[in-house]
Image: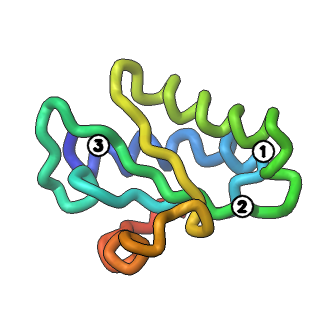
Amino acid sequence: MNRDEALAHLKAIEPDLRALGVGGLSLYGSVARDEARPDSDLDILVEPGSDAFYDLRNYMGAYERLAAAFPGLAIGYSTRAGLSTHIRAQVEREAVRVF
């Protein structure tokens, strides 16, 4: 999957994700760099829209919605706070904002 395809799929499910408390979404990693291989995963950085996002149903619901939009593709899913400090700067440099 290339970057433009991933961005189009993510934009298409924006209303569903916002309904689950997602305030913003960015793509990072090999797909964002347009360097994905067939075995690459899809790395997603989620910005909570409110504390309601952290309700387990919303948090996992957003993940499940992403997984349904990209069947067969492994999803890497994190908030900024959940990123290791060792990779956070790199992720923030290469992240492509979806919404």
Q: Residue at x 41, y 28 (%)?
A: 70
Q: Residue at x 47, y 29 (%)?
A: 69
Q: Amino acid at mark 3?
A: Glu
Q: Amino acid at mark 1?
A: Ala
Q: Are marks 2 and 1 in contact (CB under 8 Å)?
A: no
Residue density around tag 2, few if under 14, some if 14–19, many if 20 or more, within 10 Å: some
In front of the other: 75 or 11: 75
Give whichever of discs 3 and 2 has the lower sequence position. 3
Q: Is residue 61 above or below residue 18?
A: above
The reply, left or right, for residue 12 in relation to residue 31 is right
Q: Residue at x 16, y 45 (%)?
A: 36
Q: Is residue 33 above or below residue 36?
A: below
Q: Residue at x 60, y 36 (%)?
A: 63
The residue that disc 3 covers is: 5
Q: How is the image coloured?
A: rainbow
Between disc 3 and disc 2, the foreground one is 2
The reply, left or right, for residue 32 in relation to residue 18 is left
Which label is found at residue 37?
none
The residue that disc 2 covers is: 48
Tell how many labels. Answer: 3
Q: Amino acid at mark 2?
A: Pro
The local secondary structure at tag 1 comes to helix
The local secondary structure at tag 2 comes to strand
Give whichever of discs 3 and 1 has the lower sequence position. 3
The residue that disc 1 covers is: 19
In front of the other: 7 or 44: 44
**Where's residue 15, x and y in %?**
67, 45
The reply, left or right, for residue 85 in relation to residue 16 is left
Residue density around tag 3, few if under 14, some if 14–19, many if 20 or more, within 10 Å: few
**Where's residue 40, x and y in %?**
22, 38
**Where's residue 61, x and y in %?**
70, 32
Separation of residues labelled 3 and 2 (CA atoms): 24 Å
